[in-house]
Amino acid sequence: MSKIFLVDDDTDLTELMQSRLTKEGHQVHTVNTGEGAFEAAKKFKPDIAVLDVMLPEVTGYQICRRIRKDPELYPIGVLVLTALGEEPEMIHGLEQGADDYLAKPFKMEVFNEKLGALESLLSTVKQRHPITQLPGTDAIKREINFRLARGSAVGACYITVTGFKPYCAVYGREGQKRVLSFMGNLLTRLARDMGIYECTFAHMGGEHFVGLLNLDDYERYCNALMRIFDEKILEIYNQEDRQRGYILAKDKRGREGKYALMALSIGVAHTQHRAHKNAKKLFEVLAQAREVAQPDGKSVMFVDRRKSER
């Protein structure tokens, strides 16, 4: 069960919601004005905040933005309630740092569904890959949304280990574990060694990783990452493959072919020239940048420097 913080000036609604949620085992604290709501949340330390948008004195959006800027509260789940059910208003709510929205009036059954989905999301973002010990896609997208909502200047890096699948075909499950363990350790250790602490890394599955760094840090970090990867990755090949400079592997049809040794393909999207509104938009640019970054024997990085949407 969760600690839920309700902020709505409709006292009848908050009493109903508190009664229902308490019966279901949740711990609930209610506030009926925007003024002082953030300070009350700091004391209550909720798992989830439910914020009405239209509040006297301080709006739900203002409270949400303060939550996302607070080092203690920023990871909590936020559900905004809005009487304006149009899509632009809902998108605006997400861009303020909310996880989800619910249009008023609503049925309690729908509210419970939203609450359950948010609890599941919070559980998911806490999970770690068993080998890399990194969080997954939901966690990094959520972190990107939070950083964008705070107005942070960031550089997001889509990092792909090219040649990973052929390597796994030759070296098997143990080889796969070696590469993933190597990447998980390298990504986090390098940031620590370089004194870069405001960063987040995620493992999206297989050979795909994402790093989120401050705008001033991403370029020097990625250059160091590529250099160290290209130096160290040779150590996990056998001597024959290292000397050859490629591996022999079979494709899905059983045909043997030559495959290049592993390298990094890094696509970067940042906020220096374009104000990306949310993680979805940023990931679209990331995917485009990564497609351009095609290694030719060595790791390569491509940075999207466009100043317009084209």
Image (spheres, helix red, strand yellow):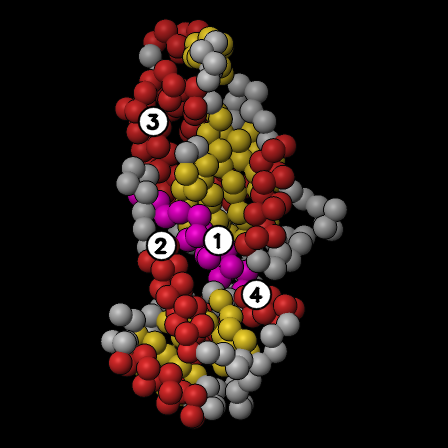
Tell me which corner region of the image, top left, top right, bottom left or bottom right, holds residue 187: top left
Residue type at mark 1?
Lys
**Circle 3 sits on which residue?**
176
Of pointers 2 and 3, the one earlier in the residue sequence: 2
Query: Looking at numbered disc 2 in the image, what kind of residue is underneath it?
Result: Thr
Q: What is the distance, in whole Å, between disc 2 and disc 3 at their CAs?
A: 24 Å
Q: Residues within 10 Å of mark 2 (few under 14, many from 20)?
A: some
State the image quarter where residue 132 is shown. Answer: top left
Residue 95 numbered mark, or none: 4
Q: Look at mark 2 in the image and give the residue it sits on.
A: 124
Between discs 1 and 4, the one toward the N terminus? 4
Residue count near mark 1 (Cα–Cα under 10 Å), binned few <14, some 14–19, many ≥20: many
Q: What is the magenta range?
A: 133-149
Q: Residue furthest bottom?
A: 11
Q: Secondary structure at mark 3?
A: helix
Query: Sequence order check: which comes first, mark 4 or mark 2?
Result: 4
